[in-house]
Image (cartoon, rainbow, N blue to C red):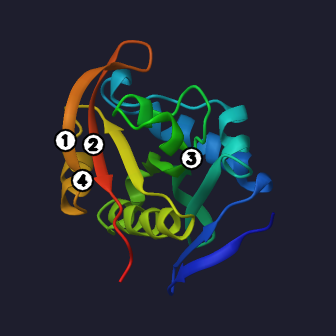
Amino acid sequence: MGSSRMRTGPDLDIRRLGRGEVPAVAALMEDVISRIPAQELFATDDVDYLYAHVEEQGEIYGAYIDGELAAYSVLAFPGLREGNLGREFGVPEGELAYVAVLDATVVHESARGRGLQRYFHELREERARAAGCRYLYSTVHPENRTSIRNLEAKGFELQFTRLMYSGKPRHCYAKRLGEQT
């Protein structure tokens, strides 16, 4: 599947990514994560995960500034697979196909302050609605204040906190997607 453009500007181009961009996504993730103060703040994804999420298990969006990938964001459609966060939230087995997850968003330091994370939240929610999803979930480290603020600003509510992702603490947020009017 090829890329499709979402939002452009004089130096900004946001679009859905395809297989060809996965190496750049992985490189950006490794680069940014190498400088965070505590590795437990972010649960890294492997390349297989990224490839799966530009295809059948989700969508990845990238923000290019002056032609360089500066940020990316993952929307996961876990379906009935074992890792579906809906089970953590008590979604009945018959409803798991209607779950979407706002997964990782990584923004290079040079691109911070442009509202990219909030824009990605809006974009992914819109895409989840278009896919017929009813439940939207996200997890965030309790000390990641920026991500917490951005989730809450978009109507997500904290449901519980627990250890996840190989023992890393996570706040677990939920948003029920109502019918569109």
Residue 30, x across and y down, in percent: 55, 35
Q: Is residue 153 left or right of residue 11?
A: left
Q: Amino acid at mark 3?
A: Ala
Q: Amino acid at mark 1?
A: Leu
Q: Secondary structure at mark 2?
A: strand
Q: Tell me where residue 48 sits by quadrant.
A: top right
Q: Amino acid at mark 4?
A: Phe
Q: Which residue in the protein does label 3 denote? A: 97
- Circle on res. 173: 2
Q: What is the spatial separation of the Cα atoms under label 3 and label 1, in whole angstroms?
A: 22 Å
Q: Is residue 38 left or right of residue 66?
A: left
Task: Check the picture and name the quadrant holding the C terminus.
Answer: bottom left
Q: Secondary structure at mark 3?
A: helix
Label located before the other in sequence (1 or 2): 1
Q: Which residue in the protein does label 1 denote? A: 158
Residue 14, x across and y down, in percent: 55, 72
Q: Secondary structure at mark 4?
A: loop
Q: Amino acid at mark 2?
A: Tyr
Contact between labelled residues 2 and 4, with CB atoms less than 8 Å apart: yes
Contact between labelled residues 2 and 1, with CB atoms less than 8 Å apart: yes
Q: Residues within 10 Å of mark 4 (few under 14, many from 20)?
A: some
Looking at the image, which residue sits at the far top? 167
Q: Tell me where residue 6 sits by quadrant.
A: bottom right
Q: Is residue 147 left or right of residue 72?
A: left
Label located before the other in sequence (3 or 2): 3
Q: Foreground: 95 or 115? A: 95
